[in-house]
Amino acid sequence: MTSPAERHAQLLAEIEEHDRRYHLEARPIISDAEYDALVAEVRSLESQQPELVVAWSPTQRVGMKPVSDFPKVVRAVPMLSLDNTYDEAELTKFHERVLRGLGGEEPTYVVEPKIDGIGIEVTYAKGVYQLGATRGDGRTGDDITPNLKTIRRLPVRLAEPASLTARGEAFLELAGFERMNDERVLAGEEPFMNPRNACAGTLKQKDPSKVAGRPLNLLFYEIVDGDLLAESHSASLAWLRKLGFPVSPDIATVRGLDPLLEKVRGWDARVRGGDRRFGEPLPYDADGLVIKVDNYAQRRELGATAKFPRWAIAYKFPARQVTTLIRGIIPTVGRTGVVTPTADLEPVILSGTKVKRAGLHNYDQVKRLGLRPGDRVLVEKAGEIIPQVLSVTEPSEQPPFEPPTVCPSCGHPLVRYEGEVALRCPNRVECKDQLMWFVGFFCGRGQMNVAGIGLLRAWQLIEAGLIKDVADVFTLTAEELVKLERWDTLSASNLVAGLEEAKKKATLSRLITALGIPHVGHVAAQLIARRYQRLAAILELVDRPDGKEALAADLLEIDGIGEVIARAVADFFSDPEARRVIDKLRGLGVDPEETVAARGHLEGSFVVTGTLSRPREEIIRRIEAAGGKVTGSVSKKTTYLVAGADVGKAKMDAAEKHGVKVIGEAELETLLAPG
């Protein structure tokens, strides 16, 4: 006779098999009622013997209590953005850059549909689902483990006891989105505007049971780290499928430029024109393609910039367009003082969203288009995200719009610096709009992470005279705050406590990002912070008689920092007003350090190339473990070129040009040996 434990294990195996057939193969062999009966039997057994419950039981899909807030997940490998291209000429230039980086070696590309959803990352230990997180800012995301677990396509136990981290996209299929909106309308609720927003809102529900009631879907496209030792991206995708992950059936590989362009044209005809010769319409929104070099060794050789990998690019489909009337132009002042014109439009639906405003770049663009009140204009979403005015289709007889001469915020005369097209308010200290945006950015997630100060509250505090620069944020007191509208004792004390917490948890890299230095984002800030570790080290350099030049020259020694970023950072720290704010922050206790992990004995930057006696990945891992840094291309910052057989001419020429020492494997072994 079968014991309850044996029957429970048998039921779980059956359910896993039916899940695989239904969600991965779309070939169910039992009805929904029969499936539900199996789950009901599992639930009955577990209620009688709770010790039978395991993490991958179907009863645990919605077994967690609502959360009050989402914990943060800091990932070791950031989720980088991709550079974009919008036409074949730009895609050809990408291919040519890849060829140069590989010394003329023809790459194989993986071509994937770019789903218009929400990026997610999941982690498994010994085959069991442990953690799920949103993309966030790339480095830090929200822990949505229980919410992702409710999605039936997510395997809670893999086909093998593998430990890995994988990335994918959460989304709503168009049919499911329509059904969900019909249900919301019948219930008297507002329908969602588009599937992506609905998906984002669903993933951030604090009650997992509400997530389970919405038809979310998943497709996975990448293994970040784990047990797999594969040579290519396509091989890792095959392993993901084998483990039970849903992977897009539309992913394909091509070798060389001409087959790549042919594949892109077919996708464009399929998605934009509905041409079924190239495949059935996709069941979800896709705004383009992701094109990646397949071979991992080639990816390492190509490397990455501070923002994008050099081995991948996003090809965006042409944007959808509509016409509507322009009612006016609204000038807005940004964080850097640039005054940007925004078109005020007669509301119109575009790509599933209601558009009331559209960008105009600058006032030269307004003049070039000859815009007048009442014009009918052509509007599109650039990259399917940002509405832009393209042209006038029916001109009105009104006088044309004129650019402003004074700042709409502070009334200061606007200027146009030499070489710039933008109108700019130079009144950095007293312009309230600039300060509002700066405070909002400074306090934002990924910068100083001060919860409780968004743009509206920043404006209120500025208007009340409590904030005159970003350093004043850390002078706020509960006694001052409770005197303002919409503040009570709890919210005031929470903010003050949050400010103290922000001081404790701040890092130098986040502070450098928060200071809003032109061209300096999170990645560049981390590179700078790792080199100096303390603000004092930067200030000591800039306080020298040749301070600005000394700092710029020193920054250029950092691999990944170029002339533009080095000059911007040196200019910023040499500016008297910026220095005043920095000194004020330090005086208020905002003087964080950057913790740098202990490195091995090996120093310098290495490039590994050619045919070697062992896998290149193994050699790279050994160099990095010993403390060295490995990059993909030879530059003046490279210390050694580790060359095997059949080295490309381009790398050898670059080494000779920059005076880089070329060594073989035997010399590398000597360097790797400790002491």
Image (spheres, rainbow, N blue to C red):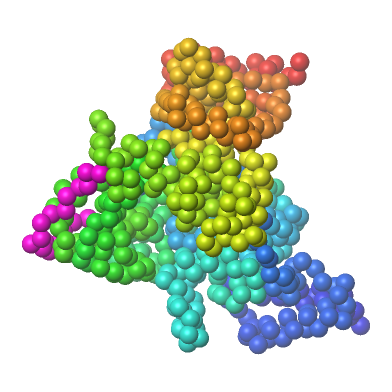
Q: Residue at x 44, y 22 (%)?
A: 649
The reply to whether residue 179 is in sight is no
Residue 395 in magenta?
A: yes
The reply to whether residue 580 is in sight is yes
Give the number of marks.
0
- Left or right relative to 504: residue 277: left
Q: Residue furthest left?
A: 397
Vertical position of residue 241 compared to residue 642: above or below: below
Quadrant location, the N terminus? bottom right
- Left or right relative to 553: residue 504: right
Closer-to-camera residue (610/387)? 387
Closer-to-camera residue (164/24)? 164
Vertical position of residue 42 compared to residue 458: above or below: below
Q: Residue at x 67, y 64 (%)?
A: 68
**Coordinates of residue 502 in the picture (x, y in percent):** 63, 44
**Coordinates of residue 567 in the picture (x, y in percent):** 42, 25
**Coordinates of residue 366 in the picture (x, y in percent):** 19, 50
Residue 566 in magenta?
A: no
- Left or right relative to 653: residue 157: right
**Coordinates of residue 309 in the picture (x, y in percent):** 48, 40
Vertical position of residue 661 compared to residue 558: above or below: above
Q: Residue at x 56, y 49 (%)?
A: 445
The residues colored magenta run 390-407
Closer-to-camera residue (218/525)? 525
Vertical position of residue 178 compared to residue 495: above or below: below
Quadrant location, the C terminus? top right
What secondary structure predominates along the stretch shown in magenta?
Answer: loop
Q: Residue at x 60, y 32 (%)?
A: 586
